């Protein structure tokens, strides 16, 4: 047996080695001796890809044979991270590739680093889409992810003189080795122009004329699953100018038109909007959203008709379209348009089809993130879609008027078009058969608040499915040492049944296991320290407690609460020569939207605090603040396994779920957090002893917002430590430049124009946060007890796998059958 397996492995190693050397020669004209690292990397990818492509062909053929119902997951963001390692892992080929590379004298790590990361997302929503793709393929569910192939992803962040500087992310500069164009599926997307009515035989037809054309060209990336032959596709649409725009033009008007068409094509898939939880009515963003939805829907219909013929009544049986937040919600009127104008269905028939086909996930209740497009913008850019929206709205408002005669305010709140704006969330709820929140608490808030009026008239649509993360990337790939230890203890069943991580729980009483678990955390901290030194020239000490807050910078996430607390600790040390704390390294990593001025000031403050501490020898011996530049999937993979305390400290009700929280938990960090989003469910699972919960609960926060009863100034006046820290925002303590943080000071005490002071309750929660942090410091001194609690966190994290989340989506919403690979 054993020797048979070994023989097979040797044969596999030899095959891979020859393949790589062959590709080096044929694709790059190089030999092993003179190949550059990039040529080696490309040859490895190409070898891995050959195997995946064979599986992709087979997966597609089987889906055709089995008439599989298929999911289209539409998202303007997909934050995939690097693919090479994940694909090798999914193919169960890690040992083989490792052996080949060792034989060739190449370091695996160096090869993985050659890949540029597709950063086609801002944060949680984009990364969730990527985790979902991993689980969908693993569970053999037929799905296509659909997005935009941005030429530039999210900006690269550098910190210069303590401040954020944005650089373009030219991720395609050296090509994307995983993608292949599917030119045969290119479609046209039309913008602008006008509608002409034409009556023939008493029938009205609408002709859309004088529009600008953009070609949508799909590029496909294979998405592998773990230990399965199933391969799905991520389809990324690229905008190109139509061939016709190269034709000779015989008038200046026509020439100008052609030039505009080219410009449109060049900008549409140019760059990802670096905005997270904040909406601006930018024309280009509307065009991007329509570009994605129109191209995708045309493809969906064409693909359906190829398999099932021209009758689209059965579309809802075979297709489910999921819209990831409202960004692709134009899918609803666009599908109406295609069904009516292209396929000849009547209004009622078309509406009946879409109402059984589209499902919507909401990811945020932040009012400023809910998309509303100026009516005029939509009318001018998408005249036919606009007309359909008007008709949807007219019919819906009629119905509402019957329900709520005379209640204009209530009707306006539900309307799809009101006060000259198109409300995308209302459109999404109206047009979907399912609306879900991303944690239990968030689901409740949608029902009782955000969509309360919808919930009263269509309660059957609403549900909540708590987010999840792929434990393959976030444990197996990011933390190989812990993976090996877990496997030693409980075997590898948890790879495919992640909830079996719970079997680890009893090992918290196994002294040898606890010891090893602690050593692995230490090694991961040392790995991070080396990374910091290499990448940023910063020295951090693995003896300190690693306390990490890594996520987009937003006031509701309250990096400011963390920063103010550090200032208070500093002051205690500086003011009292006897005062001591458990040595701690506070690590921040966060990108701020380039236009979000206060967020950038908070980054500046964090760096200034770090520099201030460095100048104080006694403070420096117990405290350090470092900023990890350019947070990204690859950075998270190094940072998270090294973390001991995970900061999940949003104002309760504001963080829809959080997913970073789950990644840290899985890697054995304890969480300090509010009862917000999925923190609530983490708390339910690990119990109060194994998590540090603090702060106002959702109910109390809602109460405060409803009654405007909170005065931060009272806390400022009563609490001397807070007062001192806030005053230091104005004097020269943290920065030589006077008043650099005046805006932050002002918002905490007086609020922004028209709003309440300290809207995210930083001062309100400061006291309980500070007390929880005190307990962290003293608990950390008992390393053994700390590690035991970390083990409980890893053990209970299996439920937060995206395999569980996808299973729930499938049971409640999608109802897909796994593709059968038996012969
Ligand atoms: C229109 C601008 C814009 C862009 C992105 C508005 C809103 C967004 C996203 C919805 C922001 C986002 O990523 N939300 C996060 O989604 C995660 C996945 O469900 C949740 O875990 C986070 O709590 C939520 O903030």
Image (spheres, rainbow, N blue to C red):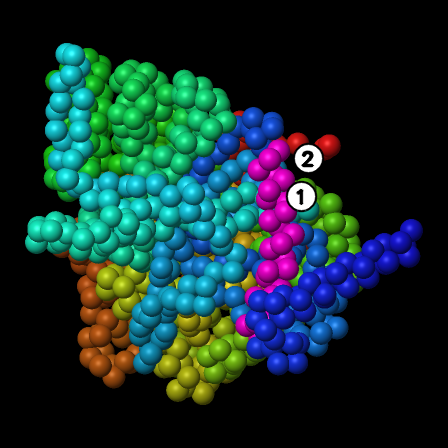
Q: Position of residue 338 (x, y in %)?
A: 30, 28
- Say which quarter of the image contains residue 118: bottom left
Taking the spot 39% from the left edge, 53% from the top edge, the residue there is 149
Mark 2 to mark 1 CA distance (whole Å): 9 Å
Q: Which marked residue is nearer to the observer: mark 2 or mark 1?
A: 2
* Marks 2 & 1, CB-CB < 8 Å contact: yes
Q: Position of residue 106 (x, y in %)?
A: 67, 75
Q: Nearer the viewer, residue 40 or 70?
A: 40
Please provide the residue range marked out in magenta.
37-62
Q: Nearer the viewer, residue 424 or 213?
A: 213
Does label 2 point to a residue whose CB lies under 8 Å from ligand 1? Answer: no
- Image quarter where the C terminus lies is top right
Mark 2 Cα-neighbour bin, 10 Å: few <14, some 14–19, many ≥20: few
Q: Is residue 620 above or below residue 790?
A: below
Regarding mark 2 in the picture, which secondary structure is present there? loop
In the image, is 277 to the left or to the right of 235? left
In the image, is 485 to the left or to the right of 243? right
Predominant secondary structure, magenta span: helix
Q: Which residue is mark 2?
A: 821
Q: Which residue is mark 1?
A: 228
Taking the spot 52% from the left edge, 60% from the top edge, the residue there is 177
Regarding mark 1 in the picture, which secondary structure is present there? loop
Q: Nearer the viewer, residue 284 or 701?
A: 284
Is residue 763 visible in the rendered image? The answer is no
């Amino acid at each position: 047996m054993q020797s048979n397996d070994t023989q097979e492995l040797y044969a596999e190693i030899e095959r891979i080695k020859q393949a790589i050397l062959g590709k080096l020669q044929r694709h790059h004209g190089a030999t092993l001796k003179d190949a550059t690292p990039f040529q080696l990397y490309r040859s490895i990818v190409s070898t891995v890809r050959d195997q995946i492509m064979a599986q992709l062909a087979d997966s597609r053929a089987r889906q055709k044979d089995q008439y599989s119902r298929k999911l289209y997951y539409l998202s303007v963001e997909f934050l995939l991270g690097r693919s090479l390692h994940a694909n090798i892992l999914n193919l169960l080929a890690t040992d083989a590739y490792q052996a080949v590379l060792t034989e060739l004298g190449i370091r695996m790590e160096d090869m993985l680093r050659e890949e540029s990361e597709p950063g086609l997302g801002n944060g949680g929503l984009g990364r969730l889409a990527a985790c979902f793709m991993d689980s969908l393929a693993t569970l053999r569910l037929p799905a296509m992810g659909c997005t935009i192939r941005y030429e530039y992803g999210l900006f690269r962040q550098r910190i210069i003189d303590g401040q954020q500087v944005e650089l373009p992310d030219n991720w395609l500069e050296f090509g994307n080795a995983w993608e292949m164009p599917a030119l045969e599926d290119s479609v046209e997307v039309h913008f602008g122009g006008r509608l002409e009515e034409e009556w023939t035989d008493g029938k009205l037809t609408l002709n859309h004329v004088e529009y600008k054309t953009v070609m949508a060209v799909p590029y496909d990336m294979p998405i592998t699953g773990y230990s399965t032959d199933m391969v799905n596709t991520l389809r990324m649409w690229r905008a190109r100018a139509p061939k016709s725009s190269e034709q000779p033009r015989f008038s200046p008007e026509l020439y100008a038109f052609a030039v505009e068409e080219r410009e449109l094509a060049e900008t549409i898939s140019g760059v990802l909007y670096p905005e997270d939880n904040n909406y601006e009515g930018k024309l280009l963003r509307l065009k991007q959203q329509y570009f994605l939805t129109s191209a995708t829907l045309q493809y969906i219909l064409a693909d359906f008709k190829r398999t099932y013929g021209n009758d689209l009544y059965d579309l809802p049986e075979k297709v489910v379209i999921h819209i990831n937040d409202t960004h692709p919600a134009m899918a609803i009127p666009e599908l109406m348009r295609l069904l009516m104008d292209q396929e000849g269905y009547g209004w009622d028939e078309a509406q009946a089809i879409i109402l059984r086909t589209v499902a919507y996930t909401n990811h945020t209740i932040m009012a400023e993130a809910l998309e509303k497009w100026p009516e005029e913008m939509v009318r001018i850019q998408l005249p036919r879609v606009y007309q359909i929206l008007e008709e949807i709205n007219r019919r819906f408002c009629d119905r509402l008027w019957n329900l709520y005669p005379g209640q204009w305010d209530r009707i306006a709140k539900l309307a799809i078009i009101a006060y000259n704006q198109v409300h995308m969330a209302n459109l999404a709820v109206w047009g979907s058969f399912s609306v879900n929140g991303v944690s239990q608490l968030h689901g409740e808030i949608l029902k009782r608040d955000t969509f309360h009026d919808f919930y009263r008239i269509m309660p059957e649509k609403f549900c909540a499915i708590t987010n999840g993360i792929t434990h393959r990337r976030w444990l197996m790939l990011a933390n190989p040492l812990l993976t090996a230890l877990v496997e030693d203890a409980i075997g590898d069943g948890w790879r495919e049944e992640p909830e079996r991580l719970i079997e680890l729980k009893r090992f918290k009483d196994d002294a040898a296991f606890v010891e090893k678990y602690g050593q692995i955390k230490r090694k991961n901290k040392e790995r991070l320290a080396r990374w910091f030194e290499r990448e940023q020239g910063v020295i951090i000490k693995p003896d300190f407690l690693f306390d990490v807050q890594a996520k987009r910078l937003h006031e509701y996430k309250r990096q400011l609460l963390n920063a103010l607390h550090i200032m208070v600790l500093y002051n205690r040390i500086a003011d009292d020569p006897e005062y001591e704390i458990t040595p701690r390294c506070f690590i921040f990593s966060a990108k701020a939207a380039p236009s979000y001025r206060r967020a950038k000031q908070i980054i500046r403050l964090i760096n200034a605090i770090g520099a201030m501490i460095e100048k104080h020898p006694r403070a420096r011996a117990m405290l350090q603040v470092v900023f990890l530049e350019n947070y990204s999937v690859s950075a998270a993979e190094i940072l998270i396994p090294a973390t001991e305390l995970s900061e999940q400290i949003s104002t309760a009700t504001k963080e829809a779920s959080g997913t970073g929280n789950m990644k840290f938990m899985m890697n054995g960090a304890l969480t300090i957090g509010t009862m917000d989003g999925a923190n609530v469910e983490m708390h339910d699972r690990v119990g109060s002893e194994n998590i540090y919960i603090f702060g106002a609960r959702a109910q109390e926060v809602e109460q405060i917002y409803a009654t405007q009863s909170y005065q931060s100034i009272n806390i400022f006046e009563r609490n001397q430590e807070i007062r001192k820290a806030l005053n230091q925002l104005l004097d020269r303590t943290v920065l030589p430049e006077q008043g650099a943080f005046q805006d932050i000071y002002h918002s905490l005490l007086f609020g922004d124009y028209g709003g309440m002071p300290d809207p995210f309750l930083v001062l309100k929660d400061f006291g309980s946060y500070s007390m929880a942090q005190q307990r962290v410091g003293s608990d950390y001194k008992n390393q053994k007890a700390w590690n035991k609690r970390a083990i409980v966190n890893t053990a209970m994290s299996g439920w937060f796998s995206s395999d569980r989340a996808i299973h729930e989506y499938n049971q409640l919403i999608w109802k897909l059958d796994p593709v059968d690979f038996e012969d």
